[in-house]
Image (spheres, rainbow, N blue to C red):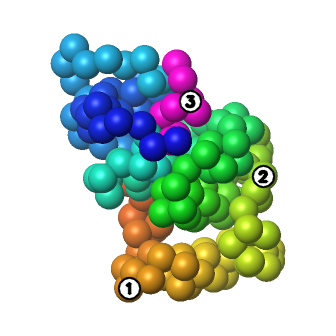
Amino acid sequence: MRQPDVTTGNQLACALSALGVNFILGGSGGEDTSFHNQPARLIAALAQSDEARLRLSLIPLFLEHPEYAELVRVVARKLDPAARLTLQCYYSAAVWFQRKYQSGGVPLPNHFSRDLRLESIDNPDDNLRALAQRHKELSGSFANWLGTYQHAAQIWRKGLEYREA
């Protein structure tokens, strides 16, 4: 499902902004914003982005739009392995942050624990730690995945506080 690199970061930022996901600065100007009307295309483009900030925006995207969960498995199957892993892990992080911080609303189904060979338990923090460890193992990257997930959630929560103020 790798699309030609004609999608710009500004296009993706514009689409996120149009959807109320204020995670990334930018997204202004006359860029094509059709991505916000095509959630499967947006999810795929974010997962495949060369920019870490855009990939990471998947977490707040799913927290803001849990209805997109119905698309995530189909999109994941069409991605190359690296982008698929990104999508699976960031979506899973959104699942655990939603359970930690939100009550009510549309719950994000736990689509990928089996694929990632993770056993989920009732404690979202323990699940996030296990996910971060598995992400490290599967990606071969020594990144601080837990800190990365927490960064996305922190910025998302600050945006919620700002909107409510």
Residue closer to the observer: 56 or 23: 56
Q: Quadrant of the C terminus?
A: top left
Q: What stretch is highlighted in magenta?
A: 37-44
Query: Residue 74, image x and y in percent?
Result: 70, 42
Q: In this view, does 127 lie above or below 74?
A: below
Q: What element carries label 1?
A: loop
Q: Is residue 148 above or below residue 46?
A: below
Q: Mark 2 points at which residue?
A: 109
Q: In this view, does 154 lie to the left or right of 52?
A: right
Q: Say whether marks 3 and 1 touch (CB < 8 Å).
A: no
Q: Is mark 2 on a helix, strand or loop?
A: loop
Query: Between tags 1 and 2, which lies in front?
Result: 1
Mark 3 or 2, nearer chain start: 3
Q: What element carries label 3?
A: helix
Q: Name the residue under label 1.
A: 142
Asked whether residue 43 is drawn in magenta, I would say yes
Q: Is residue 123 left or right of residue 83?
A: right
- Taking the spot 46% from the left edge, 50% from the top edge, the residue there is 47
Residue closer to the observer: 52 or 107: 52
Q: Is the magenta stretch mostly helix, strand or loop?
A: helix
Using the rendered view, name the quadrant where residue 56 is placed: bottom left
Q: Give the CA distance from mark 3 to mark 2.
A: 17 Å
Mark 1 or 2, nearer chain start: 2
Q: Report the disc number at residue 39.
A: 3
Q: What residue type is labelled 3?
A: Pro
Q: Which amino acid does label 2 sit on?
A: Pro
Q: What residue type is labelled 1?
A: Phe
Residue closer to the observer: 148 or 98: 148
- Taking the spot 56% from the left edge, 57% from the top edge, the residue there is 84
Q: How crowded is the residue under tag 3: few (<14 C-alpha within 10 Å), some, or many (20+)?
A: many
- Taking the spot 37% from the left edge, 19% from the top edge, the residue there is 33
